[in-house]
Structure formats: structure tokens, C-alpha cells
Image (spheres, helix red, strand yellow):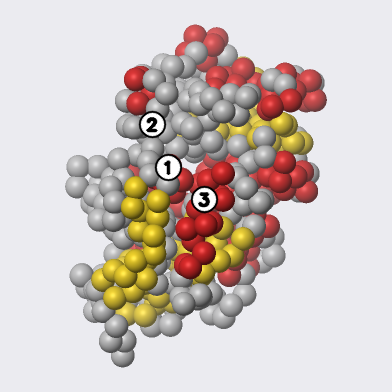
Amino acid sequence: MTTATTMKALNYIGPYQVRVEDVERPKLEHPDDVIVKVTTKPEAAICGSDLHMYEGRTAAEPGITFGHENMGIVDELGEGVTSLKKGDRVVMPFNVADGRCRNCEEGKTAFCTGVNPGFAGGAYGYVAMGPYRGGQAQYIRVPFADFNALKLPRGKEHEADFVLLADIFPTGWHGVEISGFRSGESIAVFGAGPVGLMAAYSASLRGASNIYVVDRVPERLAAAQKFGCVPIDFTKGDPVDQIISHNGGEVDRSVDAVGYQAVDSSGSSEKANIILENMIRVTRACGGMGIPGLYVPSDPGAADKASANGMISLSFGKLFEKASGSLLYLEAVNLANLLQGLSLSTGQCNVKAYDRYLRDMIIAGKAKPSFVISHEIGLDGVVVAYEKFDKREDGYTKVIIHPNGGF
């Protein structure tokens, strides 16, 4: 029986400051809860979206424990849990959902209305997403565990692949899915961070003819090129012109895997709408745009007042010009959702819609997303890892944390 009442956890202190601290160990709060030990193997991960909080670009307050990509071993169970047992290896979607609300019943678990009062959607360790401590810690409480925890085969096989089921592999797949992609089509992915690489990899698994990946970090572009993508360095010329020249015309689909902190060709000036504008330019009439990249309603570090309030300009006339007669489909943006135009879809990934199938692809040897992982560390190395990951230094692409190691 575990008697420790505290644990190590990575907490946000302020912009560009995180620290490993002793915090209260989570307890069972409801019969449907489980406590998961985020073991040396399995693990947690640093996500690109954690950097938005790390940089002070959200409303995150000091004391929040980061970490929404979590995997581990069930250590304690509430009396209402029926499908899990102690010792089970599980991975948790970053979405916290109750499985009971209307949105959950329709498969839209990213927009659960039962876990975060006044807001549609909950997540571990993320600003405004509910009271759920993140998993960059030694233990994590998982609510509604029968619904939220995906069981994995016992043992240690595929550990680095399975942890990516919590977010980036499903989110990359989701970006391709919501673009309306069909096998044989061409696609442009903007951003070669973890989600962008997973979107490009998903497009490859799904039979894309040509895959273009746009970024400026050589190591990331090289990673995309290794599985057959065409790397596009946006510092060497207009990426849209480069893609159209190589493809012999516009692409069928495009994916935004960057979000609101996109930069211009200089790499030093933010331009929140540049990816969206490039997608409109590069995607053919009647094609589709998928936007899993993060956009927020409030950005304290924005370059202008409109962006600070989550308002980003968009060439809607050009969108309309490329009309297909299909509805503009939006899950999480406040735009006129009945305007007809080039197909555009956005919103957080409903991880449970994909994770079971992607798990089985990994088990069958059909997918191995762990190629994206560049570094594995203990909690004692997290502070430095955040600094290097944020600066895109030393090849930092995806960082895996082993919270119960390194002490």
C-alpha cells in the first residue's frame, strides 16, 4: 500500500519559467476515478501546445501542472470502475470527457459539457480546461476512467508509440480527416512540429499522392522527407509558389498544424493569419482545409489588439470564390457557419474517435509514429528541455518524460 502523500510534478511559475515541485499526490475523488502511476516507462510528453502556456501566451496562472499526453499503470481504482484493474497499462486521451452528455454521445468528446462548467471541453493540465492536474508528474487522477482510459497490451512493447495516442497521432490524423482528404489526393501540411509530422505521416498511411510539408527548421523538414514528403522551407521563397510549381497546380487539401503563433518568412515576426491565407491560396477550388492548429480567444502576447482578443482577419472573399456549394463547417470558431465556400473545418481533436484504431494499427505493425520522438528525459531534465524545445534547438522535435525516473 502506497503511503506517500506528496509527489514530484512540473509546475508553471511564469512566462518561460517551470519548476519541479513537491505537490499533493492525487486521491480518488469519485467512484469512477482511477489513479495512474506515470511510470518510468510508460511516460508523459511535452507537447507543442504546452509551449503556448510556457511562453505566457495564454491566461495560465502560476501553479498549474502541465501535461496532457499521459500513459501509465493503474495504481488505485474507485469502487465504480468496472473495466479496469490494478496493473493495467493505459493511455488517456487529452480530452477529459464524461461519456454521458449529448456531445459525447455523438462522439464529440473534445466538447464534453459535463466536465468543465460553463465551457464545452476539458483536458489535463491545460488553461481553462477544468480542474484536472496534468501528467508531467508521478501520478495522475483519471476521472470517468472506464470511458477515458484506453487499455493497452500488457508488457513494454510499443511504449514510445502508444504515448502518442494521447494527442499528437490522433490530432494529426484528425487534421487530415477534417480536410476532407481522400486516398490519392495531394496535401500540404503547414508546420513540421509533432502534430504536423503526424498529419503528414497520417496522409502517407492513407495513400496521399504528394505530401508537402512547410517549415523552416532543417531537422523537422528532414524528418518529413524520410517518409516521402516534399520539404518546403518557407524562408527560401513563398511556400505557396514552391508547392504549386512542384505539384503542377494547387493541392487538393491542406492542414494548419501551426496555429496562432505563426511567423512570416523572416522567422522573427508573428503573423497570426499567414497560415490560413496560404492555405486559401494553395488549396484548389472545391478542395478542403483542416485546421487542428491552436487558436485562442485571448493572447496576452499578441502583436496587435485584434489578435489579442482572438480576432484574426481572413480572406473570406477568396474562400467564397473557391466555392463548392458545401457548408463551411466549424466546431470551435465564431464565424458565420452557414456561409458557403472552400471547405474549412477546425476544432480540437475528438481523440476517442481515433485512438482505438490507431492503437491497433501500431500493434499490427502498420504504424510506428515514434519516429517523431527526438529526446527522452527524466523530470530533472524538464526545465532545460522546455527551453530547448521552445527555441527549436539541438533537434528538439518531440520530448518524452519519464516522471518516475531521474530522482
Between residues 390 and 118, which one lies in front from this camera angle?
390
Label 3 or label 2, whichever comes before in sequence order: 2
Q: Secondary structure at mark 1?
A: loop
Q: Residue furthest bottom?
A: 1
Residue drawn at x 74%, y 36% as measured from the top left: 231
Query: Can residue 152 be seen at all in this image of the molecule?
Result: no
Whole-percent x, y for residue 70 in the image: 45, 63
Residue drawn at x 62%, y 52% as measured from the top left: 396
What amino acid type is highlighted by mark number 1?
Answer: Glu
Name the disc covering residue 387, or none: 3
Marks 1 and 3: CB-CB under 8 Å? no
Crowd class of label 1 (few under 14; some 14 to 19; many from 20; radius 10 Å): some
Name the disc covering residue 278, or none: none
What amino acid type is highlighted by mark number 2?
Answer: Gly
What amino acid type is highlighted by mark number 3?
Answer: Glu
Residue drawn at x 63%, y 41% as measured from the top left: 192
Q: Quadrant of residue 357?
A: bottom right
Label 1 or label 2, whichever comes before in sequence order: 1
Whole-percent x, y for residue 337 in the image: 37, 22
For label 1, the residue is 55
Q: Secondary structure at mark 2?
A: loop
For label 2, the residue is 301
Q: Is residue 254 above or below residue 195?
A: above
Q: Secondary structure at mark 3?
A: helix
Whole-percent x, y for residue 45 in the image: 50, 59
Query: Can residue 328 be seen at all in this image of the molecule?
Result: yes
In the image: residue 75, left or right of residue 131: right
